[in-house]
Image (spheres, grey):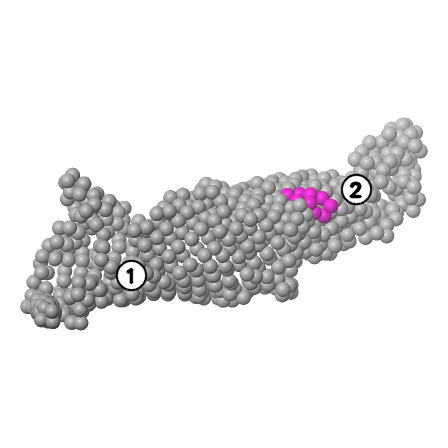
Amino acid sequence: MGRAIKIIVIVILAIVVLLAAAIFVVTQVIDPNDFKPQIEEQARQNANLDLSIPGDLSWQFWPSLGVSLGRTEARIADEEELFAALDNASVSVAVWPLLLGKVEMDGVLVDGLEVNLREDQQGGNWERIGPQNDASPDQTEGDEQTAEGGEEGSTLDIPLTIPSVDITNGRISYRNATDGTDIRVEHFNFNARDVSLDQPFPLEMSLRYQDQSDMRVDLNLKTTLAANLDANHFVLNPMVLDANIAGATTQPVDVHLEQALEVNLEEDSANLTGLVLQAAGTRTTGEARITGLTGDLVVAGKLDTEPFNLNTVLKTLGEPAIETRDDSALNKVAMSATLSGPANSVIAKPLTITLDDSTINGSAGLQNLETGKIVFDLSMDKILLDQYLPPESPSSEDKPATTGGDAGKSGGTANLTEAELIPVETLRPLLLDGKLRIGHLTFEQIEASDLSFAVSAANGVLKLTQASGKTLNGDFSASGTLDVAGKTPRISARTKVNRMQIQPIAKMAMKDDLATGLFSMDGSFNASGNSQKALVESAKGNLNLGLADGTVRGLNLYNTLVGGINDTLGGLKGLTALIPDQQSGKLPSVLSEDTKIIDLTSKTRLDKQVAYLESLDATLEKGSLSGNGWFNVLTQQFDMHIGMKSPELDGGKYLGDATWPLRCQGSLESSPAKWCGPDRDGFRKIAQQAATNAAKGKLKDKLGIDAEGDTTEEVLKNAAGQKAREEIEKQRDKLNEKLGDKLKGLFN
């Protein structure tokens, strides 16, 4: 028995020695470089690649059996550009387990891998890799059977564990000549230990990504992979990813991601659990399940972003902080979202966003992942806009020069820029459909409620289909369109204001308590161009304005009228009795410095930067107005011709229904008391007409003469002529002299 065992041991040792000797002979006697021509020929026939192996092929004998490959280059057949290359690679198996009938990989190393992918209108260069001849039906059928798991394509049944797989210093580039894409992946390193298809194994990967937009991402991934190839089931748990992203923001951003990722290709699904995303001072947690990875994508899950300070985030990104009047503004921004929606969309519903003391609820997301259409339907409870306004500071802007006459009508455009104002290329492909409601809003101490807005965008046309709300005891509505589909952007808008208190608006616009009353407006305008200057110079529109129960502070048109009348009539002797019920011949002024308006309506036409007041009709507490003029919306200069009637002069025997002309001109920045004054020439003409009428009346009453004439002198001459003809036969010269003396005494 002992002899038999001894013989068996000797036989086994002999076999081992013979196998070892055979391996030694193969590795030492046979030169693998002799097989280069055959390898290159096979690459040409089966892969359509011109393979060049300038480096050496070499055997490794102990303690591992393997082969190493030196510098190797591959080019697509008949092309000069390098498709792929590597500096060296090696594959080895442990010798001793191999002698015992076991296959144990010792390691795989690939160093200096380089791949150059190119694409143009004819397709990608990688599509030209593989056999270029049409395969025979028998061969195709055989390939299909192999792919389906036939006998020739049976999987490897022996257990396989690889202690290490290393890919170092890899480089991959992709260029698309059609759209200009230029992507480079450099410093690609991959390391896996104890690689097995039966047990989870750790792996690490790092790379640098760069593209044509100067975006750069340095990425490091650490995870443990469990792979079931038969079930197409892969689990990465835990998975930790750290990245440094540069080019998207002023300063590079560090991103840290932790999660467990499970991918099941058979079910076409992926699960993300335990998600923790930290970036630029924000922290988001959540989970998600994705189905339809290769078809109609469906996403479900939940994300929560913890409260963060927006200015802190901006500082991390290298962007300037948003300066606000309230230092506590933007200190608390948070989000909670439940991901849902139909296939091929990602919708956050319900969605809750917290902005300091404001809360926004509703839904938002991408309605269609293919078209990128954005949809939202949101409601905000309240917001105090004042705290988000820029800090107040002394104005350093140059005020427009005050000029009179028509010079102010065309001024103001010199300060307008011709720089591009509307991001046309960004807006043209935009697809949008959204609604926003705000319960209560405060802006510059003006409160508004029940605000509703609706916007849409498609085919290069952006529409504000609704903008409405209640404010200042009135309400407003508006709509507008921005059309960027053509070469030149076009803007149109329609606005309606109904009986809104004008006082807060006037104080906000002119920094002065200038006017009170109920303001109404119905207007439309349009413009075209893509700069401030172009839009202003092409602006056209129409406005119907109204003011009821109003007051213009610091401007008393009645006193302006009274002063002009008193000055004009007081300078003409004998006309002191023209003013009814005023024996002194003077109208009394009122103590108020304001003008009270019972009702006012006007029609205005906008052309470029000038609003032309085509008609103005107003009923005042003391008098009435009518007029026209213009107002430059850029320089705030104006020039208006106003006709005013006074109730104290109505029914006057000689003044009749006179309309007294006033001239209002200047700038809104000047004192209202200096805006308006009497039109001296116009007042003088009215006074002269009144004197003429008075002369006719007195001649009729006292002398019975119906004198004619447009002026007093003409009337006197005409009356004298009539009287002279009656007494010409008596005493022509004497009568004329006496009559002249009497008339002169009458009007002295």
Badge 1 element: strand
Give the prevailing secondary structure in the magenta stretch.
strand
Residue underneath mark 1? 196
Q: Residue furthest front?
A: 1
Q: Which residues are magenta?
A: 468-476
Q: Mark 1: give few (<14), some (14-19) or many (20+) Cα within 10 Å.
A: some
As drawn, is 365 to the left or to the right of 505?
A: left
Q: Amino acid at mark 2?
A: Ile
Asked if the residues shown at circle 2 and circle 1 are in contact, with their CB atoms under 8 angstroms apart, the answer is no
Q: Position of residue 112 (x, y in %)?
A: 24, 65
Is residue 493 rendered magenta in the image?
Answer: no
Q: Amino acid at mark 1?
A: Ser
Query: Between residues 396 and 255, which one lies in front from this camera angle?
Result: 255
Residue 544 visible in the picture: yes
- Is 634 situated above or below 582? below
Badge 2 element: strand
